Amino acid sequence: MTNAQEKMNIVIVGHVDHGKSTVIGRLLSDTGSLPQGKLEQVKLDCERNAKPFEYAFLLDALKDEREQGITIDTARCFFKSAKREYIIIDAPGHIEFLKNMISGAARAEAALLIIDAKEGIQENSKRHGYLLSMLGIRQVAVCVNKMDLVDYSQKTFEHIQKNYTEFLAQIGLKPKFFVPIAAFKGENMIHPAESMKWYEGPSILGVLDGFEKAPSVEKRPFRMPVQAVYKFTEQHDERRIVAGRVESGAIAVGDSVVFLPSHKRSEIKTIEGFQAAARTAVSAGYSTGFTLKEQIYINRGEIMCKAADILPLVSTLLKVKIFWMGKSPMVLEKEYKLKLGTAKVPVTLKAIHKVMDASELRKTEKKMIERHDVAECTLECAWPVAFDLTGDIEATGRFVIVDQYDIAGGGIVMEMVEDQQSSVREQVALREEKWDASMIGADERQNRYGHGPKLVLLTGPVGVDKKSIAKQVEKSLFDQGLKTYFLGIGNLLRGIDADIDRHKKSRREHVRRLGEVGNLFMDAGLIVLATASNLDDDELRLLQEILRRESMLIVNVGTNHFREGAIDLQLDEKASVAENVLKTLALIQS
Amino acid sequence: MRHLEKLESQSVYILREAYAHFKSLVMLWSIGKDSTVLLWLARKAFFGHVPFPLVHIDTAYKIPEMIEYRDRLALEFGLNMIVGQNKQALAEKRTFPDGNLDRLACCKTLKTEALVNTLAGKWTRERLNHKTGKYEPDTSTEPYTGVIVGARSDEEGSRSKERYFSPRDKRSDWAVGDQPPELWNQFKTDFAPGTHIRIHPLLDWTELDIWEYIGQENIPITSLYFDRGKGERYRSLGCYPCTTPVKSTAKNVQEIIAELKTGKFANIAERAGRAQDKEDGGGLETLRREGYM
Ligand SMILES: Nc1nc2c(ncn2[C@@H]2O[C@H](COP(=O)(O)OP(=O)(O)OP(=O)(O)O)[C@@H](O)[C@H]2O)c(=O)[nH]1
Ligand SMILES: [Mg+2]
């Protein structure tokens, strides 16, 4: 049994009181989509409360909404035309509820933007237009509403049409239709209006049916942000399943895959499902799961790609456009979190290039991004992320910014900026591509040892004792039966590093080698305890290219020179070794 | 992709996001068709497993067949089944038909209060022992901070304004005017201590979608939804004093679908048979603000 009926998500946006909810209420009622008795019930409610009837009350279900006569939050409703089914999202027009409008609009495939004929183009008519373009909604129809209030004047309509088309052109949007309507009276809603014979285009219903479904992304490069790697051992299920939703492209059993940013590689062994027909291929849109041929160590947040495809970009620096919804402004130097795909990375605002008030598109010299602003800026992530440019693949080319606990901004990636680590990153990519894996999978090792690999790196000023802590921790782990190893930096300097001098200039190479040696020990499944004095943010970034950040624990002893949030544990140099050992152990075992 | 495949994929995505972000996560199972579809989707998401407990609030006014059906499926699917109840209110007969509460107050007492306290771990929870098939007091009193719920936006006005991930503060209040933004499948997954979260994977589904999916997947559903010879069936399951069956001769899923598409229910709201919705202008909104599902 199938449901072949096509569905489309449409959002209705525009300035406050221009008639968005009325348009929808009227559509629902004129197409007979309301449940029996609903219209009568709302009319009765209005009578009881001595209020004039509004079609908007069919949508504005919240008590506050009806009392104030405004929409506060987006509502979803459903209706059908002869062509397809619609899910209509009613967005609020009041600036106070912009984040609600964005939440609604982000789900839509097309938009109706309503402008009041009498009031003309207002602040949010423009702001919403701008946001539609950023949210990736390319199909927009503009409805000039309340034509009854301007005597159905063709001149007024054309004036608005001209001005608004010019505005949209500046932001690269071209409206598909311009329609004069009188929503309350139902004119030009589902039938052509007697009152506006000069207008020859489609009515609202015709406009909706005129929107097209977006072309499929199946032929694009394959991308699947990893949601989780599942293993339900307790339920006697030995499968190790990499789960996620395919956002773009298609993949089949036997295809080689690469995970970014780690560059780990494997091959698709099976495509998993539950109570579903067996599959050998899967494409964009499906939430699915895979088992892999070589068991590699990967985490949530990576993007699974097809090795033969054009791969996503990897960097710590991204040039982006963002819009800000946070109560406090976005400022330089402060740490936020970036969520892109399933990755979540600490991020800071590195530079602001342009800030504009979304309704005016003025460049300003602001040093911060305030609520309802749109900005072009550069973001710096604490460790590398994989992404696409929004023009190439939308799903992996957009992100949100979390301030404290709240999503405070959203944005799209315009460009990649090369950071200092790009040459090491290439080396690591090559290392992973050519990696000669043993027959023992990472998870088999983990099962046998009872723990996963980790690199615990103790750093801090010269002269502060880190080694005693590291060695004590190693001993304690060893006594608990764990596989562990103390990697003394001195042992590297006089061995593997003997060919390079100990000059400051060579520090970077020493750190790189420390990372690579750490990588080998971790591949062997060990918990490695390493020490290195005076590491700085840049050197940490370098290490994060060689090893995944999640696989490292950074412990600083004594004065802390790292940027906010860079380390996992801060220890007091004056505390006893025993105390510091306990804290480090607690970190490892948390 | 077909419509039901899209809905399924989105719900599965949401369930996995919930599982990735919340340690103490539970799913509410009212035994009705929606939350049973939700349970099915969880098994899809986690490849046959349900890695979190299911919570059922037993008002003691549930139709007995619902309880039998619940326990049968719980044993068959290997579910970690937890049951909560407002024992005190029941003992004191503070309920709608027996006591002097009105319908809304009864809902509040037997459902909302029981739910809030069961989730918080303040009242005894009964956990199903799979070996004996009996319920035993649960030793864990750990509060559940993430709750997966089967609300659909087509059910009623205030539900049409929900987010997939919706925070509630300490008192379970729903700040309807100030909900977090939710875009491009990025949900609110960071929380100040003390807040908890409702997760709504079924928001995009309509009643018809639910039945078509039940048909497609052959999901076992309680027979109360079907006419068993008397010319009536339940369209929505609640407590028996407040839920009346509808006149219908639909005997199986296909007949229900036909009835919803073109037949007698094509445009009658599903909750028309739920009396508590009508008691005050925004009845369900008031309940929901206080923690009703
Ligand atoms: N004269 C006239 N009034 C209209 C028309 N359409 C809507 N209105 C009135 O405009 C007012 C605002 O309508 P709503 O539909 O609530 O506006 P909205 O855009 O949804 O408002 P927000 O959601 O609060 O931004 C109501 O009083 C409507 O009755 C129309 O075609 N003609
Ligand atoms: Mg409105």
Image: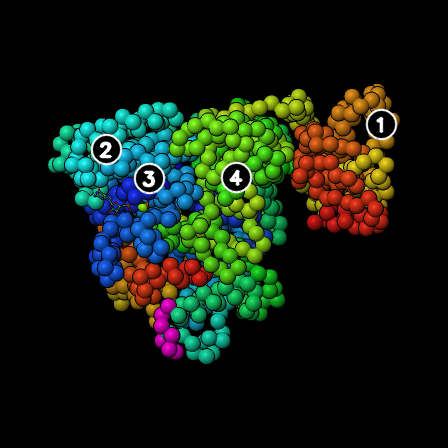
Q: Are marks 1 and 4 on the same chain?
A: yes
For badge 4, the amino acid type reads Pro
Q: Which residues are magenta?
A: B97-104
Which chain hosts label 1?
A
Q: Which of pointers 1 and 2 indicates the residue nearer the eye?
A: 2
Q: CA distance from mark 4 to mark 2?
A: 38 Å
The residue indicated by pointer 4 is A329
Which chain is disc 2 placed on? A
Q: Earlier in the sequence, mark 1 or mark 4?
A: 4
Looking at the image, do the residues carrying marks 3 and 4 touch, with CB atoms under 8 Å apart?
no
**Could you say where residue A476 lies in the image, as x and y percent from the top left?**
82, 48
Amino acid type, mark 3: His
The Cα–Cα distance between marks 1 and 3, rounded to whole angstroms, is 67 Å
- Quadrant of the image for the N terminus of chain B? top left
Q: What residue is drawn where x is 42% and y is 59%? A: B289
Question: Is B71 left or right of B258, judged from the image as shown?
Answer: right
Q: Give me the C-alpha separation between circle 3 and circle 2.
A: 17 Å
Mark 3 near ligand 1 (CB under 8 Å)?
yes
Residue ID for mark 3: A15
Viewer-proximal residue among A567 and A330: A330
The x, y position of residue B25, in whole percent, is 54, 55
> Element at badge 3?
loop
Of the two numbered discs 3 and 2 on the same chain, state the one appearing first in sequence. 3
Q: Which secondary structure lies at badge 2?
A: strand
> Which residue is identified by label 1?
A493
